[in-house]
Image (cartoon, rainbow, N blue to C red):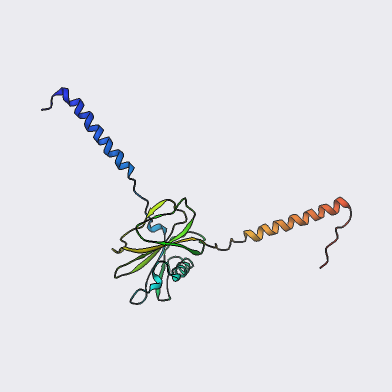
Amino acid sequence: MIPTSKLAPLAAAFCAVMLAFSHNARAHSILPTVTPNLSIGVLSAARDGIPNSRKPGSGASTAYVNHLIGMALDTTDVAVGQIFHRSNNDFGPLPSAVFDRNGVGKTIDLGAGGLYSYLFVDYNGRSHATEIWYVGNLSGIIRIPATPGKHGISGWTLFGLGVGVPDGGATVMLLGVALCALGMARRFLVRLTGSSVPTPRH
């Protein structure tokens, strides 16, 4: 039996230890992980063997990403010896992929955000696969899933922001508004001066 006089100090010490452990647990926060709803699609080999062009850092990886983002949602396509499967995740208009840098490991620092568009991750193993994620709306340090299909990461590539898709006529609309404004200004000048403004000859 613990004497009543010592019970209070023991309880205080126990609470202090628990608070110290809980503080340490909060200090080591869990990094956000790229999730399936950010997946643009997956590449797999259409023939035996994985070509070196699939490896991160190869010039072909940019073409692969651009081919994938140009596909219709939830479709499969075979091109250049690869099977492309586009996910059903709709991100709206996507910019073209522009190579930025390569790396290895399970974590990536995306900085303040808005610097990168796509993450190309190559997984090794017998059933080799490459997955592409959209990271344009992410920032800070993120974690790559290490074992999709029970395979490790052989490397990754980050792509910057490329040229976007056509803006749906917004530029043409602004040009039309500007031309209308010029026309109205010309009419105002004609009324103000009482004479027509000479039209320049070509």
**Most extreme residue toward the top, as rendered?**
5
**Most extreme residue toward the left, as rendered?**
1
In the rendered image, the vertical position of residue 20 relative to residue 133, given as above or below: above
In the rendered image, the vertical position of residue 192 relative to residue 47, given as above or below: above
Quadrant of the rendered image containing residue 127: bottom left
Q: Quadrant of the C terminus?
A: bottom right
Which residue: 19% across, 29% down? 10
The front one of 153 and 39 is 153
Q: Quadrant of the N terminus?
A: top left
Where's residue 196, x and y in %?
A: 87, 57
Which residue: 74% across, 57% down? 180
Q: Is residue 83 visible?
A: no
Where's residue 158, x and y in %?
A: 44, 61
The front one of 8 and 197 is 8
Which residue: 49% across, 55% down? 115
Please state the total of marks drawn on the protein image.
0
Quadrant of the rendered image containing residue 101: bottom left
